[in-house]
Image (cartoon, rainbow, N blue to C red):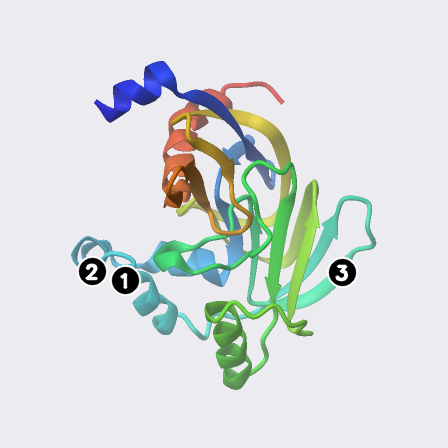
Amino acid sequence: VAALDVAFDGFDKAVDLVRLQVDDQPPDHFAVMAGIGLDAVIVERADPKMKRAVGSAAYFVSAAQNANHPAMHATIVVDDQPPIKRRAHLIMVGNVGFLLANIQLMPSARADDGILDVVVASPRTLSDWVRLTTRVLTRRRQPDDQLDRLTGHKVTITVEEPDQVQLDGDTVGECNTLTAEVVPGALRLRVPRLVYELTTGDGEVSSATRSGRVSVPGVQAVSRAASAARSRLRRTPG
C-alpha cells in the first residue's frame, strides 16, 4: 500500500551521480562513495561468510587484519586548484556522507548539491590512527594536518603504485589514476510527498510531518536506485 501511495501521490527527487574513470577502463558511475587505498582493501578482503553472519562488523575485522596496508604516494587535483601531494592510506570521494554502521565520514556531503566531498587520511603512527578514528566517530570537525577535507566538482587522484579501488562497496581492481566528476541531478527517486530534502551530511531523507521530523535511511535508497541505473549508464557514451 505504501509503495502505491508513493507511486501515485509521490514526487520525483533529483539526486547526483558521480562519473568515475579508472585508468583506461570504461567509465562507471557511483551514488554514495568511491575510494582508493585501505578502504578498498578492507572491502575486497572482508570474509563473505562473516558478512552474512555478522553484517558490517566483518569490515571492522578486515580493517584490523589489513591495518598494515602500505601508504600511497598520491597527488590529488580538485577542479583547477593546485595539486596536493600526500602519503595517504586512504582517499575517499563521496556523494553521501555516511559509511556502514552509521559512521559519518563527510559531514557536509549532500546527494543533491552538485558537489563532491573528498577525504584524505594520512596518519603516520598507530596513535595517529586512533586520533583520526576517534575524530570521525565522535564527529569532531577540528582541523587536522593528517586529515584533508576537500570539495569540488571534479577530482583526479594519481598514485605512484597501483592500489585497490571500490565504488559503492564493489571493488573494481587496482589503478594508478582515477577521476571522479559529479553529474548533478542524474538520478531521480520517487519519494513520498512529505519527503522534501536530503539533509546535509547525514545521508538520510528527512520528512516533514505535522508532528515534527522523521527520517528514513536515504543512503540505501540512493544506492539501490543507482545500482539499478548503473548498467544503463555504462552503456551511455561519454
- Choose the circle earlier in sequence order: 3 or 2: 2
Q: Residues within 10 Å of mark 1 (few under 14, many from 20)?
A: many
Q: Nearer the viewer, residue 214 or 139?
A: 214
- Choose the circle earlier in sequence order: 1 or 3: 1
Q: Amino acid at mark 1?
A: Ala
Q: Give the image location of residue 174, x and y in percent.
A: 50, 50
Q: Which residue is mark 2?
A: 54
Q: Which residue is mark 1?
A: 58
Given contact means CB atoms under 8 Å apart, are the residues at marks 1 and 3 in contact?
A: no
For this view, does 52 lie left or right of residue 230? left
What residue lies at 43% left-to-right and 59% top-to-bottom?
A: 41
Q: Which residue is mark 3?
A: 84
Q: Residues within 10 Å of mark 2 (few under 14, many from 20)?
A: few
Could one spot residue 193 in this view of the protein?
yes
For this view, does 238 lie left or right of residue 193? right
Given contact means CB atoms under 8 Å apart, are the residues at marks 2 and 1 in contact?
A: yes
Q: Judging from the image, what secondary structure is the residue with disc 3 in? A: strand
Q: Judging from the image, what secondary structure is the residue with disc 2 in? A: helix
Image-quadrant location for residue 152: top right
